[in-house]
Image: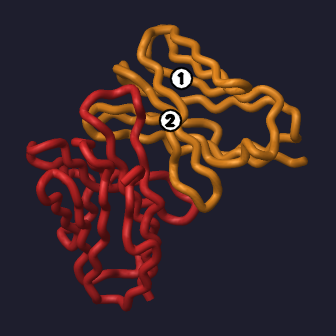
Amino acid sequence: GAGVSQSPSNKVTEKGKDVELRCDPISGHTALYWYRQSLGQGLEFLIYFQGNSAPDKSGLPSDRFSAERTGGSVSTLTIQRTQQEDSAVYLCASSPTWTGYGYTFGSGTRLTVV
Amino acid sequence: GQQVMQIPQYQHVQEGEDFTTYCNSSTTLSNIQWYKQRPGGHPVFLIQLVKSGEVKKQKRLTFQFGEAKKNSSLHITATQTTDVGTYFCLSNTGKLIFGQGTTLQVKP
C-alpha cells in the first residue's frame, strides 16, 4: 500500500485479556519500529526490526509484550494479560534501508484497557 | 545511553509571533530529523539534517544543526493556526531516540 497500515484503529479490551496489534509497513521498507504514546506524552520506543537481523527488544516494558515480523513485512505486537497502564496509542513506523527520507508512521492503534 | 533533551515542553504564542524549539544531545549525532504531530494525528516527517552547521528552510520553517552536531533547532516565523501541534526531534542510532516534544499552541 501507499502508507503504513495499522489495525485495528481502536481496541477496547478487558484487563487480563491478550491483544494483538498489526502493522503492515510500506512494501520494501526494511526497518520497522513500534512505539507507544500515552495521552499527552512523548513517544516511547518498544522494539525495532531491521531486515533479517535479530530485533532490538530493549524497549519492551515487560515480558507481557512481544513482537514478531513475518517474512520481513507484516509485524504483530502482542500484549498478554493486559493492564490498565497499557492503555495508549501504539504507533508503527517503517523506513527503507537508506536514510534521508524519514520514517513513515501509521495512524496507530488506540488501546484502552478497562 | 544517548538522550535527546527538547525544550520547551509547551509554548503558547499569538498568531504572527515566532516560535523556536531546541534539541540537545549528550553525544554527537550522525543526523537529526524533525517531525510534526497534529492533535490526534501521528508524527509526520519534516526534514533531516546531516552536516555540521547545516541550515535548511521550508517556507516559514528554518531548521539548524549545530556545529558540534549535538544540538538542533526548529524556528517558525510568523506562526499561523495551522502550525499547531507537537514538534519532535529524532536521532537515529539504530534505535530511534525522540525528544520529548514541544507542543505549540497558537492563539488567533
Label 1 resides on the chain identified as B
Disc nearer the start of the sequence (1/2): 1
Viewer-proximal residue, B20 or B9? B20
Instruction: Pinpoint residue B55: horizontal percent, then vertical percent.
Output: 57, 13
Q: By what rule are the colours in the image chosen?
A: by chain
**In this figure, which residue is indicated by the disc labeled 1?**
B72
Viewer-proximal residue, B51 or A43? B51
**In this figure, which residue is indicated by the disc labeled 2?**
B89
Q: Residue at x 78, y 26 (%)?
A: B77
Q: In the rendered structure, are the residues bearing label 1 and label 2 in contact, judged by CB atoms less than 8 Å apart?
A: yes
Q: Residue at x 25, y 59 (%)?
A: A60
Q: Residue at x 39, y 26 (%)?
A: A100
Instruction: Pinpoint residue B79: horizontal percent, then vertical percent.
Output: 80, 35
Disc 2 element: strand
Q: Amino acid at mark 1?
A: Ser
Real-space Cα separation, disc 1 to disc 2, in angstroms: 8 Å
Instruction: Bin the neighbour count of mark 1 within 10 Å (Cα to Cα): few under 14, some 14-19, many 20 and up.
Output: many
Q: Which chain is red?
A: A
Label 2 resides on the chain identified as B
Q: Residue farthest to the front?
A: A1
Instruction: Pinpoint residue B67: horizontal percent, then vertical percent.
Output: 49, 8
Q: Which chain is orange?
A: B
Asked which quadrant contains residue B46, the reply is top right
